[in-house]
Image (spheres, grey):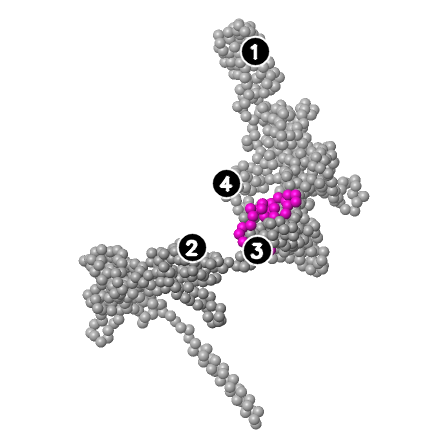
């Protein structure tokens, strides 16, 4: 990745490259770009502080189309992601060229020809509005649980529900027949087609009053009442044609609107207009709707219910413009005729807080009728604006294919100064009128302790270089004019603690104090002062033989000079003349009293009467004494397998005969105990453990007087890798078992012992190489001898 890491730096210096060098770098960068994903390329662009359009322009100077790489890598990444996530229910999957998200079919948006591959256009810049049709025909059926519109015209197939209550009770459910009527007994057929629900109710009231007098034509003294509603609605046959995903005829509910019909047909294609969708009725244009009004404002006032035979027609889009950069909603928008830059800004949601408003750049494809007047095909236009209002109300006419770029501000600060170092509140501050170094230090809550008498001001010059000015912070605080310097925008003030240059001198105290450690040495610091700083002496501390070590600079081979002092028990009451003053880097050691020592403990466990921790009473206490203090061993204790461990110096297990130590206190096995020792006495275990290079490493039942070979045989015998001569047994007390050739029988391998068979270690045979080397040397000597003899003749 080294080449691509430097690619975005090298492209700045393209003009200085030789043709050969430029060609080599282009080949290397191309190879590395092919190995990167689109996200990695974008991350590298951001790392070098460039926009994608700036990087693309630099890349073109090397003959590289950066946008092509990003688009191609994005496509590969999307394909790979589809494969990787095919089994994940919450991600996209692809089947027969269609995209499914969470099990729902989603339409894949196509790229708009003429935009992609141009400056600033990438996969994030999408044609606006089409995404709402990515999940068609699943959830956009009209609801049957809402009141019918008062303007709804009844037609053949609609179900009418007639209810009469009061003195007269009647319920009639009828579907309007092919003649356009509903038929009520004793009343006859009544025309319904083309009427609203209210008109039908009025007609029924008049006709039925002649049969049911209690209705009284709806007068105030009526004793029966009538209600009319719609049950099931008719189905309308409509056509959705033009630039839609699935043009054709559809049978939909008569309550369906234009938007619902579009969803059923999959929505407009990427080539279809969203701004001028026509509804044609009876051969004429009945209604034209603008989906941008629906999407951007939620205005569905022009979305009417469709009637049988209506045609919803989506025209091809005629005029598209892209707007990119620092704004609320970058994208590719469709513009109506006479719509201007002002309208485009409104469609895109407008500017954001860091948009640059003084200049707008437009990249324009030269129109067909003007290409003969130009040598190239693309024209760049810069529009200047004196105020944001002038930009937002701009009447500039845009043309099909224009790319409008809104850049961001330059991120330069207007009135900022900063202060760092030895102040209480370092950071960034407002540069107010006539602000000085003294003012800034006071704003930062003043200096923090002893300050070095020289600070620095880094000043930004007009050419962006830095100038350094020096001052004394302490002099500035007392308003000495030569040091209390006026500050300007982007000045950065640094003050240093005195310790940075003069260092902090310390002394160290250790031994019998509560908080031993290293402390700053103040002037006239005494030993008594240092003891108080370290929390005072502890109860074991001795005030005699206190040792003070001073650095010895008299000789290169001498490190320190020590002196012994004594201080009173109430050392804090010493007079100034009696106190011992300390020097820089002195080391003070406070010893413990001779009669004080740390309590040492030994732990004993296993088959003793009172296992637990026992303190060591004196320096001559031995193993048998601890066992005795623990109440002695219990019945069934196996002293021969007793284990003794020592932690000091990482000793570990000490092999000894614990039975001999108990029975013969004067024997060498009766060790002197030490703090941290542990003793374990177990029960007798009538097995012998066989481990290592045997076929069945396992415990073997103990047999009195059995030999080493017996136990190995019981474990399956030696493996091929076994070192038979190296087989050894370790007794339960950790000592090595030794056979005795001077008595009739070997000593018994005790219960709890371990037999270990090591692995054979084969040494490489160096005989042949050694002989070969000797033969080679002798042959060389013979050749030399023959040569010498020949010469001497």
Residue 461 lies within the magenta run:
no
Q: Which of the two discs, 1 and 4, labels the residue nearer the N terminus?
A: 4
Mark identifier at residue 452: 3
Residue 525 visible in rendering: yes
Q: Dividing the image into 4 quarters, which one contains the C terminus?
A: bottom right
Q: Nearer the viewer, mark 1 or mark 3?
A: 3
Q: Is 117 in front, or is 567?
A: 567
Residue 449 lies within the magenta run:
yes
Q: Are marks 4 and 3 in contact (CB under 8 Å)?
A: no
Corner quadrant of residue 149: top right
Distance in Å between CA atoms under marks 3 and 2: 27 Å
Q: Are marks 3 and 2 in contact (CB under 8 Å)?
A: no
Q: Is 628 in front, or is 224?
A: 628
Q: Residue at x 49, y 85 (%)?
A: 778
Q: Is residue 38 left or right of residue 625?
A: right
Q: Nearer the viewer, mark 4 or mark 3?
A: 3
Distance in Å between CA atoms under marks 2 and 1: 107 Å
Distance in Å between CA atoms under marks 1 and 3: 103 Å
User: Which residue is identified by label 4?
Assistant: 89
- Segment tinted magenta in the rendering: 429-454
User: Which residue is identified by label 2?
Assistant: 533
Label 3 crowd bin: few (<14), some (14–19), many (20+), radius 10 Å: some
Determine whether the residue tagged by mark 4 lies in a helix, strand or loop.
loop
Q: Residue at x 62, y 28 (%)?
A: 299
Residue 172 location (% of width, % of height): 51, 14
Q: Residue furthest left?
A: 635
Q: Residue furthest right?
A: 373
Label 1 crowd bin: few (<14), some (14–19), many (20+), radius 10 Å: many
Q: Which of the two discs, 2 and 1, labels the residue nearer the N terminus?
A: 1
User: Which residue is identified by label 1?
Assistant: 204
Determine whether the residue tagged by mark 2 lies in a helix, strand or loop.
helix
Mark identifier at residue 66: none
């Amino acid at each position: 990745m080294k080449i691509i890491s430097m690619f975005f730096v090298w492209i700045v210096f393209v003009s200085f490259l030789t043709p050969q060098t430029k060609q080599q770098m282009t080949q290397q960068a191309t190879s590395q770009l092919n190995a990167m994903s689109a996200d990695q390329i974008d991350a590298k662009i951001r790392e070098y502080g460039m926009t994608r359009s700036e990087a693309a322009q630099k890349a073109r100077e090397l003959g590289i189309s950066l946008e092509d790489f990003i688009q191609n890598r994005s496509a590969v990444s999307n394909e790979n992601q589809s494969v990787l996530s095919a089994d994940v229910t919450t991600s996209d999957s692809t089947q027969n060229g269609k995209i499914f998200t969470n099990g729902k079919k989603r339409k894949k948006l196509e790229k708009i020809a003429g935009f992609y591959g141009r400056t600033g256009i990438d996969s994030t810049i999408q044609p606006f509005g089409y995404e709402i049709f990515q999940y068609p025909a699943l959830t956009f059926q009209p609801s049957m649980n809402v009141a019918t519109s008062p303007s709804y015209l009844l037609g053949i197939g609609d179900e009418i529900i007639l209810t009469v209550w009061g003195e007269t009770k009647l319920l009639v459910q009828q579907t309007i027949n092919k003649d356009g009527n509903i038929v009520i007994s004793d009343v006859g057929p009544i025309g319904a087609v083309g009427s609203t629900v209210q008109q039908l109710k009025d007609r029924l009231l008049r006709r039925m009053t002649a049969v049911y007098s209690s209705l009284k034509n709806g007068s105030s003294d009526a004793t029966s009442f009538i209600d009319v509603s719609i049950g099931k609605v008719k189905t309308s046959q409509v056509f959705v044609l033009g630039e839609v995903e699935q043009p054709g005829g559809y049978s939909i509910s008569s309550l369906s609107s234009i938007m619902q019909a579009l969803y059923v047909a999959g929505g407009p294609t990427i080539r279809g207009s969203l701004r001028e969708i026509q509804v044609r009725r009876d051969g004429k244009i009945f209604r034209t709707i603008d989906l941008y009004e629906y999407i951007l404002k939620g205005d569905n006032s022009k979305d009417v219910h469709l009637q049988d035979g209506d045609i919803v027609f989506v025209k091809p889009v005629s005029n598209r413009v892209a707007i990119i950069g620092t704004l609320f909603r970058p994208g590719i928008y469709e513009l109506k005729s006479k719509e201007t830059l002002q309208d485009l800004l409104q469609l895109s949601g407008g500017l954001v807080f860091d948009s640059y408003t003084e200049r707008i750049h437009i990249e324009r494809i030269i129109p067909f009728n003007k290409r003969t007047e130009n040598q190239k095909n693309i024209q760049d236009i810069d529009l200047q604006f004196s105020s944001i209002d002038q930009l937002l109300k701009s009447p500039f006419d845009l043309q099909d294919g224009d790319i409008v770029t809104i850049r961001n501000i330059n991120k330069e600060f207007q009135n900022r100064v900063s202060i760092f170092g030895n102040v209480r509140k370092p950071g960034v501050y407002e540069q107010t009128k006539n602000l000085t170094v003294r003012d800034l230090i006071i704003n930062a809550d003043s200096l923090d302790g002893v300050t070095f008498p020289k600070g620095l001001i880094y000043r930004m010059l007009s050419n962006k270089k830095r100038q350094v000015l020096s001052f004394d912070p302490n002099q500035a605080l007392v308003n000495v004019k030569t040091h209390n310097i006026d500050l300007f925008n982007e000045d950065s003030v640094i003050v240093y603690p005195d310790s940075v240059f003069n260092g902090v001198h310390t002394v160290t105290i250790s031994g019998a104090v509560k908080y031993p450690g290293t402390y700053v040495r103040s002037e006239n610091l005494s030993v008594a002062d240092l003891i108080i700083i370290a929390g005072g002496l502890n109860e074991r501390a001795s005030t005699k033989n206190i040792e003070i070590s001073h650095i010895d600079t008299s000789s290169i081979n001498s490190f320190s000079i020590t002196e012994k002092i004594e201080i009173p028990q109430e050392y804090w009451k010493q007079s100034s003349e009696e106190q011992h003053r300390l020097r820089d880097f002195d080391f003070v050691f406070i010893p413990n009293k001779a009669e004080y020592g740390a309590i040492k403990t030994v732990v004993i466990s296993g088959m003793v009467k009172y296992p637990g921790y026992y303190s060591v009473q004196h320096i001559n206490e031995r193993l048998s004494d601890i066992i005795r203090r623990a109440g002695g061993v219990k019945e069934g204790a196996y002293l021969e397998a007793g284990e003794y461990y020592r932690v000091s110096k990482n000793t570990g297990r000490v092999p000894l005969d614990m039975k001999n130590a108990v029975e013969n206190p004067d024997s060498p096995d009766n060790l002197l105990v030490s703090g941290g020792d542990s003793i374990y006495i177990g029960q007798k275990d009538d097995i012998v453990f066989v481990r290592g290079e045997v076929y069945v490493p396992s415990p073997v039942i103990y047999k009195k007087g059995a030999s080493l070979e017996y136990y190995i045989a019981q474990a399956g015998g030696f493996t091929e890798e076994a070192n038979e001569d190296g087989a050894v047994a370790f007794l339960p007390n950790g000592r090595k078992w030794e056979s005795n050739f001077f008595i009739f029988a070997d000593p018994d391998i005790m219960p709890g012992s371990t037999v270990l068979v090591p692995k054979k270690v084969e040494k490489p045979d160096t005989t042949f190489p050694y002989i070969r080397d000797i033969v080679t040397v002798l042959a060389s000597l013979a050749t030399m001898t023959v040569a010498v003899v020949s010469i001497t003749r």
